[in-house]
Amino acid sequence: MATAPGGAGAGGSEKKLQPIIIKRVKKAAHGAHGGAWKIAYADFMTAMMAFFLLMWLLGSTSKGDLQGIAAYFNSPLKVAMQGGDGAGSSSSIIPGGGTDLARIHGQVKRSDSDEDANRRRDIDAKARRAQQDAQRIKALQAKIDAMISSNATLNEYRSQIRMDLTPDGLQIQIVDEQNRPMFDIGSAVVKPYMRTILREVGAALGGVENHISLAGHTDAAPYGNGDRGYGNWELSVDRANASRRELVTAGMPDDKLARVVGLSSTDLLLPDEPRAPQNRRITITVLTHEAQERLLGKSRTPVEKTVSPAALAGQNQDNPPSSAPEALAPEIPD
C-alpha cells in the first residue's frame, strides 16, 4: 500500500512546524546612576551656607542695629516715608518725610529711639558732671581745711569759719562773735582780721572752676535811723560787696562770681535767737552746675550782681549807730 510522501502511514496526521519566538525584557537604568540628587544636595548646601552666614551676621551686629533692622522690616513703608532708624543708630535708609515728599534733605524726622538716646546721653552727661562737681568741691573743702589748720592766724579764728556741703555746693560762712565782729556797728568797713580771713579764702578759690555766690546777712536788731532810707537791706549788700572786693584782691576770679546779694535778716542762722551775733555773717557758696542752672537759669548771664530792693528800708539793723549814710538805693561799687 503506497503512502503519501511525508506521511506517517495510513491514518497518520500531518505535523506542522511552529516558529520559535524569543522575548527579551529591556531593563531601565537604575536611579542611583542619575544626576537629580546632586541638584537637590546643592540646593540644600546653599541654604545651609546662607543660614550660617545669617547667624554670623546677627551675632556680630550691635543691638541698636538689630532693633533698627527689626523696625524697618516691621513697617518698611513707614520708615521710608517718615524717616528714622532704618538701620540702628544710622540715618533713615530712604531719607524722606516732611511736607514736601519731593525733597530728601532736611526733612528726615527723628524717631523716638533717637530722642530716647539723646535723653539718656543728657542724663549720663549730667551724672558725670555732678560727679566731677562733687570731687572738685570735696577737694576744695579739704584744701581750705588744711589751709586753716596750717595757718596760725586762721586757726585762731576757726570758730568763726564754718564749712558745710549743701545741695547747692560748698558753703563757707564767716560769722560774727560777740567780742570779735567782722564789721563795725552799722558799717560795711572790713575789720583787719576779717580781711585776713577773706584774703586767705580768696587765694584758695583762685583756681576754682565752679561759679560762686556771695551773700551778706544781718541780725534782726532794730535800726534806729531806718527812716532815713538806709536799713538792713542796704547794709547787707554793702557788706557782701566789700567782701567781694577782698576776695577778688586775693586772687579769686571776678568772672566766677554768679551773684552778689544782700539778704538782710531774712535768712537767720539762729532763727530762735534773731539778735544773736552769729546771724551777722558772710556766706560764700561754691555752686554746683545744677545749682547754678537752678538759681540763675540756663539762658542768663552767669555774672549777676543784685542789690536787694530798698522798698523795705527802715527795717531792722544790727545795732543802732550814731549816724547812717543817706542813701536810698546804693549802687554796688566796683
Image (cartoon, rainbow, N blue to C red):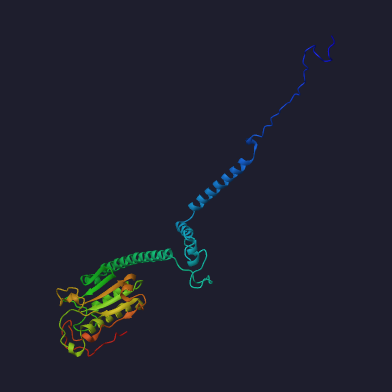
**As displayed, is residue 225 above or below residue 280?**
below
Quick one: 69 or 142, which is closer to the camera? 69
Position of 46 with respect to 154 (left or right) is right
Find residue 322 and report its image quarter.
bottom left
Position of 207 with respect to 110 (left or right) is left
Q: Residue 134 at x, y = what percent? A: 32, 65
The answer to whether residue 252 shows anywhere in this view is no
The answer to whether residue 70 shows anywhere in this view is yes
Quick one: 211 or 334, which is closer to the camera? 211
**As displayed, is residue 197 above or below residue 314?**
above
**As displayed, is residue 216 above or below residue 325?**
above
Q: Residue at x 49, y 66 (%)?
A: 81
Q: Residue at x 33, y 80 (%)?
A: 304
**As displayed, is residue 311 above or below residue 17?**
below
Q: Residue 133 at x, y = what percent? A: 34, 67
The image shows a total of numbered marks equal to: 0
Position of 168 with respect to 179 (left or right) is right
Q: Residue at x 24, y 86 (%)?
A: 310
Q: Residue 269 at x, y = what percent? A: 19, 73
Q: Residue 259 at x, y = what percent? A: 31, 78
Quick one: 150 or 101, which is closer to the camera? 101
Instruction: Work out which residue is located at the far top of the displayed protein and give it.
Output: 1
Screen quadrant of the C terminus: bottom left
Screen quadrant of the N terminus: top right
Position of 95 with respect to 122 (left or right) is right
Find residue 283 and report its image quarter.
bottom left
